[in-house]
Amino acid sequence: MAYGWICIHRKIQDNIIWNDKPFNRGAAWIDLLMLANHEDKKIIFNGSVIEVKRGEKITSLRKLSERWGWSITKTKKFLNLLSDEKMITYKSDSKKTAYSIVNYEVYQDNENIKSNTEITLKENKNKTEKNQKEIKKKQTTMNNNDITMNNNDNNTTGIVPPPEEMNLDNPKLAKLIKLYQDCGFGLITPYSANMLRDYMNEYSYEWVKEAIEIAEQNGVRTLAYIRGVLNKKKVGVDKPRNNNFKKKETYYRPKQDDELSEESRNLNNKVLNSFIEKMKKEEVKNGETKQV
């Protein structure tokens, strides 16, 4: 005698092989097991609400005979056979045939349902975790691509090149590169290092250093933004406004008096002396008029 059992999904009823007719008695018996409700359920039949228990089914002799490719007479004899063998109980009238599987739990155990549910939940959890990992992986790839695009470089290895590849012949350039990385621009690449050197040669070390800090403060960490800050500084425009950070002093302040050229001071003194002489002449003239 065989022990144990296997799970058969009801989806097998949609298979073309399962629907090959006529059924034999074994297939018809399994079909009755799969048609039976696996849990209590209420249905509307003939205008009334009927509760169908677990392991029961309401159908008709005609429907069963059509499913199995049998005659109604053969179908009824088969149901009688199952009833005699204490495998089912059933009642049939002109409107319906209702049957109940005897010892339904033997064929559809609650523990098995619980086990299958746990397996399904575990599988769904694994799929969810896998999907989340894929999404995270894609997001990381996109972020790396953004960094690469911002730096206008094709180096996507994420490895900092050795100094000899970047020709770090100036210690100030090395300081700018360290500041560039510390401010969150990403790992330095030969292209980025060369651009920083060009900026430093075109402007100055102090200007590039300040431009990197401004870009970091404003949250726009790109070489293009650094170049924009340097261009504005060159024409004497204040840094871009940002209310989230403390405003720095303007790049150029007005010259103080002590910074005026000698020629400008002499010119000012000449104008002032001329004005004083004119005022004296006016006073003398007014005095002579009063005496007359």
Image (cartoon, helix red, strand yellow):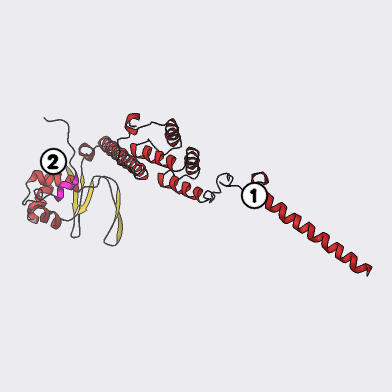
Is residue 83 found left or right of 289 in the rendered image? left
Tell me the tag on residue 119.
Answer: none
- Which residue is rendered at x = 49% and y = 50% of the image? 232
Specify the segment rendered in magenta: 8-14
Taking 92 as reference, is 133 above or below it? above
Is residue 120 found left or right of 71 in the rendered image? right
Which quadrant of the structure image shows residue 158? top left
Q: Which residue is mark 1?
A: 263
| Whole-percent x, y for residue 274 in the image | 75, 57
Which is more toward the observer, 95 or 22? 22
Answer few, some or many: residues within 10 Å of disc 2's Cα (few below 14, many 20 plus, some between 14 and 19). Answer: few
Q: Are marks 2 and 1 in contact (CB under 8 Å)?
A: no
Q: Nearer the viewer, mark 2 or mark 1?
A: 1
| Whole-percent x, y for residue 241 in the image | 54, 50
Q: Given the image, on which type of amino acid does mark 2 rest?
A: Glu
| Whole-percent x, y for residue 240 in the image | 51, 50
The stretch drawn in magenta includes residue 228: no
Tell me the tag on residue 85.
Answer: 2
Taking 112 as reference, is 81 above or below it? below
* Disc 1 secondary structure class: helix
CA gap, disc 2 to disc 1?
Answer: 127 Å
Q: Given the image, on which type of amino acid does mark 1 rest?
A: Glu
Which is more toward the observer, 2 or 273? 273
Predominant SS of the magenta segment: helix
The stretch drawn in magenta includes residue 13: yes
Which is more toward the observer, 220 or 170? 170
| Whole-percent x, y for residue 145 in the image | 33, 43
* Disc 2 secondary structure class: loop
How many numbered callouts? 2
Is residue 62 found left or right of 203 in the rendered image? left
Quarter in which the N terminus is drawn: top left
